[in-house]
Image (cartoon, rainbow, N blue to C red):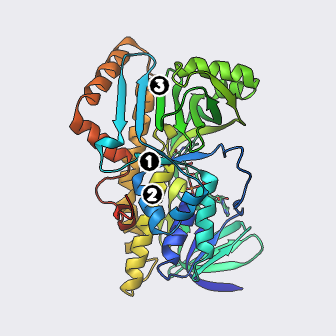
Amino acid sequence: MSKKHSVVIVGGGIVGATAGCALAQAGIAVTLIDAHNPAREWPADPVDIRVSALTRASQNILQAVGAWPAMEQRGIGPYDHMHVWDASSAGTLDFDAADTEFTALGHLVENRVTLASLWDRLESLPTASIVCPAKVADLQIASDSAKVVLEDGQILTAELVIAADGRDSVLRQMAGIQTTGWEYKQDGLVATISTEKSHQFTAWQRFLPEGPLAFLPLKNGQCSIVWTLSHQTAQDYLSLSDEDFLQQLEQASDGVMGKILAVGPRGAFPLRFQYANQYSADHFVLIGDAAHAMHPLAGQGANAGLLDAAAIAELIINAQQANRPLGSHKLVRQYERWRKGDNLAMMNSMDMINKMYTAQNEVSRQLRGTGMSWVNHNAWLKNHFNRYAMGLRDDLPTLASTETNA
Ligand SMILES: Cc1cc2nc3c(=O)[nH]c(=O)nc-3n(C[C@H](O)[C@H](O)[C@H](O)COP(=O)(O)OP(=O)(O)OC[C@H]3O[C@@H](n4cnc5c(N)ncnc54)[C@H](O)[C@@H]3O)c2cc1C
């Protein structure tokens, strides 16, 4: 049996669930499909190994869709300083919230906190429906609508289908959209650690020959690490005993956190540069990792996806208010033009930084050292980089640019 929906979102990760909340709170009938129901409760310890640095722009979006208060209640960790240094040169960079109009540069939040808060919010909105657990078996795009066929045979017909099903998006393949990119042959090794020295609410990042090592300050005083390593080294480090792993980590840390006392479970994620050649087809768009996967060295993947979610929601809400179709060619192309260039610029910046810092010849080392010192002493440039990293740039969706708290 086929039921007509205004918008169907496939994928209820951080990005898809945010789009769902934005649409449903504007009174649009939206159905979200996901293969898994996220956890809503968990023991306080250990911390989720998946943690994201969320920018000011993302905070605005999550506040505007009504998820931020529940995230605050579940626990978020602000950071007000960022210190970046290069293991192979004298280059250092510092960013401080005191140089901005905000009290924090951003927040470190466990992914499970963001997800649970978004799903709770979505369930409270009368025009939202959730189909879960459910997997998509087929996508059929027609001239006036798109149909999502579930594995149990259910068919959902919508004016617009939004694919938010992650970087290996099945919907993207079903829509015949190709991708461009490559595997970095690097993994992001993640874990939660306890340290002798306080993290001082600072995000620390040391660039090493294999990739950056970040210590991200958590609310409970621990740090989440994201350590970019060659695929082989990451696999080797996963199989080390805790004691041997801590020794490697302490060596790589330059002693910045003092003695590293304990490590929780470890995980490693293969890194990829990938963008969808198109973000849209008629009655169909891609958002989040389904549209773009980028190097996590500046923690921008989910932040970029939240801007996609806010942008497509704004276009749909405007169309609904003006009584225009929600899945028109014009609307999906407008979304693509709005978001593709911004995402590509961010992805290319991350890629360039990764290449710049893994190059170990003398010229590259000197250039890095001089370049970092130069930027560090140039208040205008630093402010520009800082605002860019906080997601505060031109042409933001309204949900991202509306300040709802200090
Ligand atoms: C090591 C590491 C550190 C990172 N740190 C940061 C950071 O600090 N800040 C930041 O902004 N980003 C960070 N990122 C990137 C960030 O994790 C991703 O960009 C973000 O999680 C993508 O969210 P998404 O909702 O687009 O996709 P996903 O989180 O992949 O969600 C996809 C959803 O779709 C569902 N799904 C998939 N297929 C189907 C199907 N066929 N049918 C039904 N449902 C389906 C899945 O169950 C899932 O819920 C990091 C990434 C890595 C690897």
Mark 2 or mark 3, which is nearer to you?
Answer: 2
Q: CA distance from mark 1 to mark 2?
A: 8 Å
Cβ of disc 2 within 8 Å of ligand 1? no
Relative horizontal placement of residue 69, taking residue 346 as reference (left or right): right
Picture layout, residue 102 above or below residue 195: below
Q: Which mark is residue 106?
A: 1
| Among numbered discs 1 and 2, the one appearing first in the sequence | 2
Residue 357 image offset from top left, x and y in percent? 43, 25
Residue furthest bottom as drawn: 323
Indicate which disc, 3 or 1, sits on the residue closer to the N terminus. Answer: 1
For image coordinates 39% across by 58% down, the residue present is 339
Which is more foreground, mark 3 or mark 1?
1
Q: Is residue 8 visible?
A: yes
In the drawing, what numbered circle is on residue 59?
2
Labelled pair 1, 2 in contact (Cβ < 8 Å) = yes
Q: Residue at x 71, y 72 (%)?
A: 150
Q: Which mark is residue 207?
A: 3
Q: Residue at x 46, y 77 (%)?
A: 327
- Please state, as top left, top right, bottom left or bottom right, where the N terminus lies in the image: bottom right
